[in-house]
Amino acid sequence: MPVVCVWIPAFRLAVARLNKPEVDLDAPLILADKIERGRVVDCTLTAAALGVRPGMTLVQAQAVANEARTVFDDPLADARVWAEVLEALDAASPLVEDDGLGRAFLEMQGIAGDAAGWVRAVHGALRDTDLGARVGCGANRFVAGAAAWRGDGVVCEGDPAAFVAPLPLEVLEIDHGVRERLRLLGVTTLGELAALPHGPFVRRFGTEAAMWHDRARGIDERPLKPRARALRVDRRLYGEGEASSEEQVLFALRTLVGWVVDDLAAAGRRAGRLVLSLECDDGESHVLTTRVAQPTAVPATLFELLRARLEGVTLTAPVTGLRLAAEELASGGVALSLFAASDPDPDAIGIVLARLDAALGEGKALRARVVDGPRIERRFALEPFTLEILATRGPRAEPAPLAAAATLQLRIVPTRPIDVRIFEGAPRFVGSPPQQVVDHAGPWRVEERWWGPATGEGAPLARDEYDVCLDDGALLRIAREGDAWSVRGIYD
């Protein structure tokens, strides 16, 4: 199975150079993840020669290479550029495996041409990038990667074992300590590793050594795992004059929705998200994203979602172009149930979400989710409100009576100080004027960041929490930090 490997050495540094053309990759350069307590993500060869290694703290790296320049990684830019590279590689082969930032493999079985032609085709697909990509070709995944490691445009045309034999152990990407142990045995190349007897080598270095031995002989039976493609149905409406009123925009939008639905029906897909772009006469462009509660291809539902999303949008100039894309496509139909009369209507909920996005901004409609945590104020997380696919699997059981199902709900309130009197180690009177504690539970100890003074992450936290029932029927969660007491929650 012929495979082409695309490898971009120091990919994150290459992306940093795209954003900052003044960056010199031949000079000592440190790429860190953040300013405070940052660590080295990558470095140039000249910085590595001074002793810089990925994983070092930024302070350590600047100490060993004080003349090196420091730049900071942008993960969003890394992901965006790498996604563009993968999309470009689709022009060379329909089967592309994403092996992480900076490396990809393409299966060339069935692609017309020879190895040299495949390498040229991949270079042509990447002609608009300036990342210093190396392209190698071999009989399998490992050999193709070894070819790219040797240099750009290298092709293994003979025996894979002889091709990889002169390469150093670093090609295997094994642990540094293992490489040092092998060097003590006089093994520095893949050819010397392949010459070791298989059984004794595996018994000494473990089962993973069997894979190393196969790679050193040019054997790699791993199949490629092609990346999932992000399908998208896209329609545009340009050059048809301009729309200067809301009715004109909605009329054009209804036409565009009809075209997109026709494409979805032809592909047997349903849209999970809509992206609408409006281009105005003054050059402004507005991009609106609409979530679909339950993927659908019903034109009336999609149109109502878009119309709800447009509520509150103010345009300063007539619309000259519309573009509508359907993303997150789902296959098949919608699961229905004979007992779904009491289910919420996903279309109605989707329209409500679209109106919330229009009024509050995209992603501002949040809901709380309960999470585990030692501190009461951290036992929930806010996340964007989404609606999972609604499908009823059968008739619902009758709900339990309220008296049997009802439980007290703890409502977290803003922290406020409160007077508490202690008797025999437990709270006995709470509040001002004081109310007697009829019963209590606790304490529950919360202790965090005891390591803070040593690492500079702040003062440690030590707190005792109690649930107290007062004589007026109130049930409170109170906490003691040192000598101070505060209210943390109220049971409803």
Image (cartoon, helix red, strand yellow):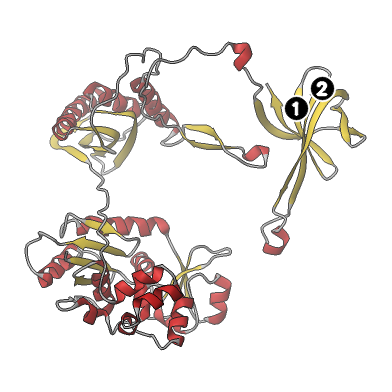
Q: Which residue is mark 2?
A: 470
Secondary structure under badge 2?
strand
- Compared to residue 201, the image places residue 474 above or below, namely above
What numbered label is drawn on residue 101?
A: none
For disc 2, the neighbor class at 10 Å (few under 14, some 14 to 19, many from 20) is many
Q: Position of residue 336 (x, y in %)?
A: 30, 20
Q: Nearer the viewer, residue 400 or 227?
A: 400
| Residue at the farthest bottom position | 186
Q: Which residue is mark 1?
A: 476
| Residue at the farthest right position | 424
Q: Nearer the viewer, residue 425 or 173?
A: 173
Q: Quadrant of residue 476?
A: top right
Judge whether residue 204 can be spotted in this image: yes
> In the rendered structure, which amino acid carries the disc numbered 2?
Leu
For disc 1, the neighbor class at 10 Å (few under 14, some 14 to 19, many from 20) is many
> In the rendered structure, which amino acid carries the disc numbered 1?
Leu
Q: Position of residue 133 (x, y in %)?
A: 26, 70
Q: Residue at horizontal 45%, vertical 32%?
A: 385
Q: What quarter of the picture does the N terminus occupy? A: bottom left
Q: Is residue 100 left or right of residue 372?
A: left
Secondary structure under badge 1?
strand
Q: Are marks 1 and 2 in contact (CB under 8 Å)?
A: yes
Q: Residue at horizontal 21%, vertical 64%?
A: 128
Q: Position of residue 70 (x, y in %)?
A: 48, 72
Q: Nearer the viewer, residue 291 or 294?
A: 294
